[in-house]
Structures are given as C-alpha cells and as structure tokens.
Image (cartoon, coloured by chain):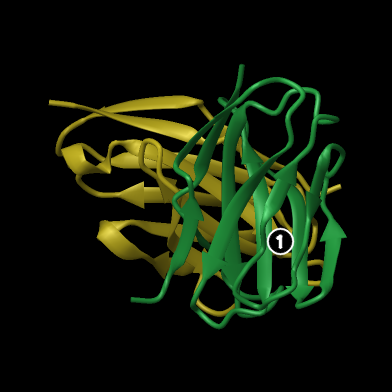
Amino acid sequence: AQSVTQLGSHVSVSEGALVLLRCNYSSSVPPYLFWYVQYPNQGLQLLLKYTTGATLVKGINGFEAEFKKSETSFHLTKPSAHMSDAAEYFCAVSERSNYQLIWGAGTKLIIKP
Amino acid sequence: DGGITQSPKYLFRKEGQNVTLSCEQNLNHDAMYWYRQDPGQGLRLIYYSQIVNDFQKGDIAEGYSVSREKKESFPLTVTSAQKNPTAFYLCASSIGLADTQYFGPGTRLTVL
C-alpha cells in the first residue's frame, strides 16, 4: 500500500533562512503529489501539486517543490522564511489509477525571530 | 464568492448522542469528501461521494454516516457507535475524483 513519510514532526528555522520540509512516498509508479498548508484551526490550502511535466513545481507564497523519481521524494522549499509561514504542512500523494489521497502526518514549521 | 462552508466551527455533544456536521459548497463540484484529523496524524478519509445519490466508505467509516441528496451538500453524522469522536473534521470537494481537492474551514467536535 502507498505510504507517505514526512521527516520531522516539527521543523524550526530562523526568519530569513531556507525552509526545507521533506516528503518521501513509497510508490514505484510516479503518483500525483501535493503539498497543503494548514493554519491553526483552519482548513487546508493547496500550496502546489505535481501531476506531469516539469519536475520543479512553483506554488503560492514563494514555495516550490521538486519531484525526484529516483529518490521517491517531493521536498518543499522556500529560500527565505517569513513569520507568516508558521503553520503545519502536509504532503499527500494519489495513485494515477486510484485517486484517493494518502496523507503524511504533517510537519509543523516554526519560525524564530 | 465560491467556496466550502462548514458549520458550526465548534460543536460540543454529550457521549451517546448523534451529531450532524454540515458541509456546503457552491463550486459546482461533483465530488465531496469527509476527513478526520487527529493531532500528530495525517488526514484520514471517512466517506466520499463522486456524484449525487452515491457515496463510498473511506478508511475509517465505522460509526459515521453520510447522505448526498443535493450536489451542494454532504452532511456527516457522527453516531453514538463511533468510539472516539472527538476530533477536527474537514470537508473537501473537487471537480471530479482525479482533481485537486479544496477544503472547508473545519468543525471541531468535542464529546463530553
């Protein structure tokens, strides 16, 4: 069965520093890949997604992610963290034949002043 | 403004009572979903509906029921059979099952 692993339940970075949130999946066939962000007590908002084509995907709020098939990874990055980036981030994947989303456990991003 | 609304935002119920959570969308989406979120865990799918008058169980459907009588509405009932109902419940919708899901603001249910 497909699984999604997000390394680190909490990640802390200083304001202005690089943000790197890791996501690995288990499928041998490239799935569809998503990153969502959740602010406290709110629903989830789509940051970006990969379906086909260019492996570097740009999203909202300056985030981007790169699909690396050989590493079965879809890590999320942002060059310079802002205080408003503090939130929980979820990686999700779906098979191309079964569209049900499989979710990672989430990573809380903490921004230090 | 198109979007997904969930009401109420906070809900308190006594143990043993059934409770219904509302989800409405005006995005003209065919597919709708209910997820449960617990601290430190990803989202888990309760039920989903691909089209009006049709719905399928997700991974954790036991103790829950849904209906889909209108395209815009997908209410979730948490029954007394659900052993641990306290959680954050999220509703989502998409054009179709293969399309991006968009989420409502969620309902936090606390069973006392």
Where the N terminus of chain B falls, by quadrant? bottom left
Q: Residue at label 1?
A: A94
* Coordinates of residue B26 in the picture (x, y in percent): 49, 77
Residue in the image at 46% along x and 60% along y: B5
Q: Residue at x 57, y 59 (%)?
A: B23
The chain whose colour is yellow is: A
Residue A91 visible to an observer of this rendering: yes
- What residue do we see at 74% from left, 36% from top? B18
State the residue lying farthest toward the top. Answer: B112
Q: Nearer the viewer, residue B38 or A52?
A: B38
Q: Amino acid at mark 1?
A: Ser
Chain B, hue in figure: green
Residue A81 placed where, x, y %? 21, 42
Asked whether, in this view, residue A55 is left or right of residue B72, the answer is left
Specify few, some or many for label 1: CA neighbours under 10 Å numbering under 14, 14-19, or 20 or more. many
Q: Is residue B43 above or below residue A72?
A: above
Quarter-wise, where is residue A97 in the image? bottom right
Q: Quadrant of the C terminus of chain B?
A: top right
Can residue A103 be seen at all in this image of the molecule?
A: no
Q: Determine the residue located farthest toward the bottom in the rendered image.
A: B28
Residue B106 to residue B93: above or below: above
Q: Quadrant of residue B100?
A: bottom right
Position of A57 relative to A44 (above/below):
below
Quarter of image, res A32? bottom right
Residue B87, above or below A49: above
**Nearest the eye: B3 or A74:** B3
